[in-house]
Image (cartoon, rainbow, N blue to C red):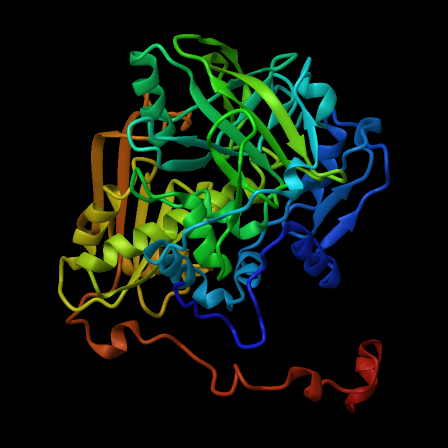
Amino acid sequence: MASISTEPGRKPVTTLREWLDRLAAADRLALIQPGKSLQYELAAIASKLDGRQATFFPAPGGHRIPVLSGIVSRREWIADAMGVPSSRLLQRYQEAVAQPVPCREVGEAPVQEVVHRDDIDIGALLPAPVHNEHDGGPYLTAGLLISANPNTGRQNVSINRCHLKGGNRMGVSVSSRDTGTFLSLCEKAGKPLPIAIAIGVDPLTLMASQALVAMDQDELEVAGALRGEPVRVVKCLTNSLRVPADAEIVLEGRILPNVREPEGPFGEFTQYYGPRGDRFVIEIDAITHRSDAIFHTIIGGGTEHVLLGAVAREASFLTSMQRVFPNVTNLHLAPGGVGRYHLYVQMRKTHEGSAKNVIFSAFSMHHDVKQVIVVDEDIDIFDPQEVEWAVATRFQADRDLIVAANCRSSRLDPTSRGGVGSKLGLDATKPVDAPPEQFLRIGVPGRDTVDVDAARSATAPGAWRQTYSA
């Protein structure tokens, strides 16, 4: 097993329930009154507490299965789940991608304590909420969709929005990456693609599902590396896929070949709606779950939604970029750019023109990247005010601006033209040969070490007039 580097005294989380205990102990979990409506009310409360506390809803809409949301809605929480300080979050994710840990198969699993096979009605069995005002209906949003390459048998894990259509049918939005490739192969053969959807996994398995890895690298093995131990998996009851044994709920089924039905709209990470369109259809053959299962939902467009994709992309981008530019020290997909479109890159600049080369490299990292700002090492890329200050004081549009037109871009960007758009690069770094005094940042000696509380007067602030003589 690959060794992992965690913070002394802090271990990675390996189960969802352990994570809920840790969240609760740190006042990061809000227990909501029972019976909240699955239609908007649940999402309204979770959205209001987004980034401050995860939310746990007993008996939502009278349903026996509780709903959970917001479990990885801050970067600090994700680092905590990994057992590392926030400063090592990307490094830890990079290590896990580079040193995957194979899964361990078991014969019995908590997720198969209860089995439903006959007359399956997903909406009756699971408390799927409706989040946003114009969503097309209830959705599964936090399920890990597991499929396998029909040529090699190697599994892939992704998160895909699944629109409940009644009975055992769901519409599903599938990208052109691994699952889309598998679907294409199956459709050519006139066969369905077996799938499983695991809901309610530990936060590290959830994060691993978003890893940008090669076609036949199983993201569950990345989860094993993040957790420091193999993910326990169990064989599905109706197909040969292996799913996390300690998940809360699993749906087993098939994506039908050459069938398309309307799906959407759905509130996406862009905080706009992904439009309604004809998309793939899933038929579910079995649902298994724990006897006391918990249903996890991710609020469309919320912080949890944005961070899930952002951290995985950051780690992948940093690994790729540092192979070519070892003087790139860090990068960040900014929340203001919905964790996908705006990339801040921090570098130790040694040659003129190198920041522009970094910009072109960043454009090629992923078609979602729309704007890149490169800054020096002294700029905190996690502070948008610092980045804006660097642009204000180190950037001139006539020499430091790059515009690349007619590039592939995100189809969910409402300004793109069918997935074609422009990319913008800003070199906000200092000239290498600038005199030291030209960009010398002001600094008050002792500011970072002074004890302000110790310096406060014991006199009430309202008595300020009495503290000096007229």
316 vs 311, left or right, is left
Question: Is residue 129 at least partly visible in the picture?
Answer: no
Question: Residue at 65% of width from left, 55% of height from top?
Answer: 19
Of 147 and 337, the residue lying toward us = 147
| Residue 212, quarter of picture | top left
Q: Would you place residue 387 above or below residue 269 in this image?
A: below
Residue 7: tell me if it is visible. Answer: yes
When the figure is inspected, residue 181 is found, relative to residue 436, above or below; the finding is: above
Position of residue 137 measured from the top left corner of the image (x, y, whole percent): 64, 18
Say which quarter of the image contains residue 291.
top right
Q: Quadrant of the C terminus?
A: bottom right
Residue 463 position, x and y percent, is 84, 80
State left or right for residue 51 relative to residue 34: left
Q: Quadrant of residue 23?
A: bottom right
Task: Pinpoint residue 158: horizontal percent, then vertical percent.
Answer: 45, 35
- For the N terminus, the quadrant is bottom left
Residue 245 in percent (x, y) is at 58, 43
Measuring 72% from the left and 58% from the top, which residue is drawn there?
Answer: 21
Total numbered badges shown on the rendered structure: 0
